[in-house]
Amino acid sequence: MKTTADLLLHPVRLRIVQALLGDRRMTTAALAAELSDVSTATLYRHVALLADAGVLETVGEQRVRGAVERTYALHLAAAQVADEDLAAMSPEDHRRAFMAFVAGLLAGYDRYLDRGDVDLRRDGVGYRQTALWLSDDEFAAFAADLRAVFQARAGNGPGGGRTRRVVTTVLMPSAPSPAED
């Protein structure tokens, strides 16, 4: 049986999950349009795996040319990798998982750049890296502050002039330099 990590950290399945973040509801056809570099057969296979595992929920069905077209939403609680699965992963497993994560970011950024009308300032696009010197307690407070900022806005749905924005965070300690030891 696959662990949640095995299920979610596949590059195509991770991109499907990322496409549905933010309370989006999409048919497989809409996912295919958004992930146009993924073959239809591959996309349908991975959507089925995610649906069978309860990561995707069917939130609507309609008949289209004799077939049933399903609309899916992300079941966020099922799309989390459990702490015990993370702890059981080898360093190589973590490398592969991080590469799948970064590949999803690159694909999303490529889609943004390929749309033609690109203005990073207008669109609020940016990528930065900052180093902070924090004790463990200061880092815990910082992480709690970040969670609070995200949670205060996580309930916003589409409409009302809102644009779906994907915010990605990567937090990790850096290796100390010899001068810091």
Image: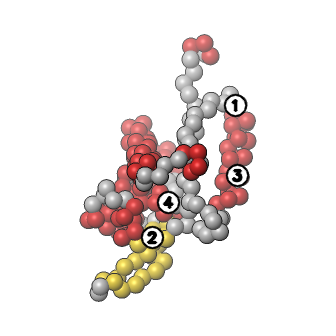
Return the residue nearer the eye: 174 or 181. 174
- Mark 3 lies on a secondary structure that is helix
Disc 3 and disc 1 in contact, CB within 8 angstroms? no
**Location of residue 167 with respect to 49 vertically, above or below:** above
Question: Marks 3/4: CA distance?
Answer: 21 Å
Considering the image in quadrants, where does the N terminus appear?
Answer: bottom left
Q: Residue at x 67, y 59 (%)?
A: 153
Q: Position of residue 106 (x, y in %)?
A: 42, 45
- Residue drawn 31% across the image and 67% down it: 44
Q: Which kind of residue does numbered mark 2 sit on?
A: Met
Which quadrant of the structure image shows residue 42?
Answer: bottom left
Q: In this rendering, which labeled residue sits more in front, label 2 or label 4?
A: 2
Residue 6 location (% of width, % of height): 39, 53
For the residues bearing labels 3 and 4, Cβ distance under 8 angstroms: no
Instruction: Give the residue type that dot 4 points to.
Output: Ala
Residue bearing mark 4:
79
Q: 10 Å neighbourhood of mark 3: few (<14), some, or many (≥20)? A: few
The residue shown at (40%, 61%) is 34
Instruction: Tell me if 180 is positioned left or right of 86 in this view.
Output: right
Which of the 4 quarters of the picture holds residue 121? top right
Q: Position of residue 66 (x, y in %)?
A: 29, 87
Which residue type carries mark 1?
Answer: Leu
Q: Secondary structure at mark 1?
A: loop
**Disc 3 and disc 1: Cα gap in Å?**
19 Å
Instruction: Say the numbered circle drawn on residue 26.
Output: 2
Q: How is the image coloured?
A: secondary structure
Mark 3 vs mark 1, foreground winner is 3
The tag earlier along the polypeptide, 2 or 1, is 2
Which residue is label 1 attached to?
A: 134
Pointer 2: residues within 10 angstroms few (<14), some, or many (20+)? Answer: many
- Whole-Å distance between the Cαs marked 4 and 1? 30 Å
